[in-house]
C-alpha cells in the first residue's frame, strides 16, 4: 500500500493564528469594549469615584462576553444559519443589560460608551460572520464511487472536491469521504 503525505487543513502557523477563537476574543474585546472606554476617559484607570466609568465598562464587558459565547456556540452547530441570528442576539443581550440598569435603578452609566460598544459589536459580528463564511467552510475530498457521488448533487455550504486519483495533490482538506461499500472501489 502506498503511503501519501497528508497535512491537515488550517495547520499552518498563520492559519492557526488567524482562526484562533481566543485571539478573536481578545482583539474584539479590545476593539469593542476597551476602545470606547479609553476614548471617553483616556485611561484604563478611571477616577476611583467614577461609578459611571466602571458601570459602563462592566455592562459593555458583560454584553460582549455573552454575545461572543452565544454566537460562538451557534457557529459550531451543524446546519445553522448564523446571519439571521446575529441581530436578535445582540439586541436581546443589550436589552438585558439596559433592563438590568433600569431594575437596579442605576442611573450612572455612559450612554455614549454603551452606544458605541453596541455599534462596534454589530460591526464585529458581521465582519466575523463574513470571515467565517469565507475561510471557515468545510472542505471535503470525495472519492467518486457509487453512492458517494450523490453528495455532489446536494446544495451545501460545504465545499466538496472529487478526487480523480488517490493523491491529494498538495491540497488541504478537512476530511476524505468515500462509500466503502462500493463494489467498484479500487484497493488503492
Image: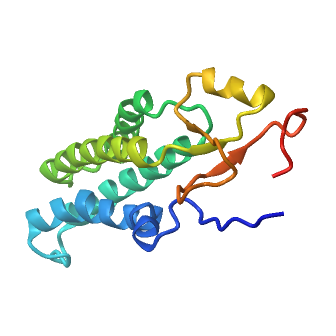
Residue 187 vertical position relative to residue 158 in the rendered view, above or below: below
105 lies left or right of 161: left
| In this rendering, position of residue 96 left or right of residue 60 | right
The residue sitting at 62% across, 37% down in the picture is 78
Compared with residue 76, is residue 65 higher up or lower down, i.e. above or below?
Answer: below
Judging depth in this view, the residue of 185 and 154 nearest the camera is 185
Report the residue at 70% width, 23% height from top: 150
The one nearer the camera, 108 or 154, is: 154
Q: Is residue 49 above or below residue 182?
A: below
User: Does the rendering let one see residue 103?
Assistant: no
Residue depicted at x 64% and y 41%: 164
Q: Nearer the viewer, residue 64 or 73?
A: 73
**In the rendered picture of this protein, how many numbered marks are placed on residues?**
0
Provide residue 166's location: percent of width, then percent of height.
Answer: 70, 51
Residue shown at 49%/43% (left/top)?
137
Q: Is residue 89 left or right of residue 74?
A: left
> Residue 49 appears at what percent x and percent y?
18, 73
* Residue 22 x %, y %: 45, 66
Q: Quadrant of residue 140?
A: top right
The scheme the figure's colours follow is rainbow
116 shown above or below 159 = below
Evaluate whether residue 66 shows in this view.
yes
Amino acid at each position: 500500500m502506498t503511503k501519501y503525505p497528508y497535512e491537515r487543513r488550517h495547520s499552518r502557523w498563520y492559519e492557526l493564528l488567524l482562526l484562533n477563537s481566543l485571539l478573536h476574543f481578545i482583539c474584539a474585546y479590545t476593539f469593542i469594549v476597551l476602545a470606547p472606554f479609553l476614548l471617553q476617559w483616556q485611561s484604563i484607570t478611571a477616577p476611583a469615584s467614577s461609578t459611571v466609568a466602571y458601570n459602563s465598562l462592566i455592562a459593555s464587558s458583560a454584553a460582549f462576553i455573552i454575545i461572543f459565547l452565544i454566537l460562538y456556540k451557534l457557529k459550531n452547530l451543524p446546519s445553522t444559519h448564523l446571519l439571521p441570528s446575529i441581530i436578535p442576539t445582540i439586541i436581546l443581550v443589550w436589552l438585558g443589560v439596559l433592563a438590568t440598569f433600569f431594575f437596579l435603578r442605576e442611573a450612572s452609566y455612559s450612554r455614549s460608551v454603551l452606544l458605541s460598544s453596541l455599534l462596534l459589536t454589530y460591526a464585529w459580528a458581521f465582519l466575523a460572520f463574513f470571515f467565517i463564511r469565507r475561510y471557515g467552510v468545510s472542505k471535503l475530498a470525495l472519492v467518486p464511487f457509487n453512492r458517494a457521488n450523490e453528495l455532489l448533487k446536494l446544495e451545501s455550504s460545504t465545499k466538496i472536491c472529487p478526487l480523480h486519483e488517490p493523491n491529494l495533490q498538495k491540497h488541504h482538506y478537512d476530511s476524505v469521504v468515500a462509500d466503502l461499500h462500493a463494489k467498484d472501489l479500487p484497493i488503492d
